[in-house]
Amino acid sequence: MTPAEQARAGLEALAALAARVAAEQVETITRIAEAYGAALSAGGTLFFAGNGGSAADAQHLATEYVVRYQSNRAALRAVALTTDTSLLTACANDMGFDEVFARQVEALARPGDVLSLHSTSGESPNVIRAAQSAKARGVRVVAFLGRSGGGLKDLADVALVVPADDTARIQELHLAIEHVICEMVEARLTR
């Protein structure tokens, strides 16, 4: 396969996966946008977390809400639980890495907030513990997953599972879907 063929095949596969998600999961996407919009309208906070590339997505998404996405508007309450290195390393050292997000949820989240977790496998112990902590506090859990959804799927109030095994494709669609949701939320809150 030539480089041009490889590029075309990769983009066409991503486009086909995006089209499948659009056809099969538009209702789930709408439910997530509604959950985010309701929380923000009521003065709640969106919390984002994940590991690796999903940690970077958490930071990216929180920024879209706090700063702006497509329109200039008031700042919206959003926090990435992946950014405080002192907190993350202290918690990992003293309590174990499984607790790095759950501990922050315990300290910061309250009923009416939404915890949005990104995990391509749905099996990472720290995101599962974060979901458990959120549920114990009456915080709604949204999960962006891949593969079969893993154990996190059953803990989420709303789960969007990208039907793929390729981590990169799953993460690319998670971010694209979250951008669509951000656009939907901005439209709702600026009407």
Image: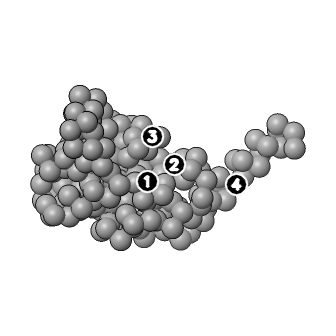
Inspect the image, locate mark 3, and give the three-letter code of the amino acid beneath it: Gly
Inspect the image, locate mark 4, and give the three-letter code of the amino acid beneath it: Ala
Q: Secondary structure at mark 3?
A: loop
33 displayed left or right of 111: right
- Residue 52's label in the rendered image is 3
- Between the C-alphas of marks 3 and 1, the distance is 9 Å
Q: Secondary structure at mark 1?
A: strand
Report the residue at 19% width, 47% height from top.
103
Tell me whether circle 3 and circle 4 mark residues in contact (CB < 8 Å): no
Q: Secondary structure at mark 4?
A: helix
User: Sequence-wise, which precedes: disc 3 or disc 4?
Assistant: 4
Residue depth check, mark 2 versus mark 1: number of the one nearer the observer: 1
Which residue, given by chain and number where applicable, does mark 4 sit on?
A: 13
User: Sequence-wise, which precedes: disc 2 or disc 4?
Assistant: 4
Report the residue at 12% width, 54% height from top.
110
- Residue 189's label in the rendered image is none
Residue found farthest to the right:
1
Residue 83 appears in view: yes
User: Sequence-wise, which precedes: disc 3 or disc 1?
Assistant: 3
Residue depth check, mark 1 versus mark 4: number of the one nearer the observer: 1
Report the residue at 20% width, 38% height from top.
94
Q: In the figure, residue 1 lies in which quadrant?
A: top right
- Residue 119's label in the rendered image is 1
- Residue 171's label in the rendered image is 2
- Between the C-alphas of marks 1 and 4, the distance is 21 Å
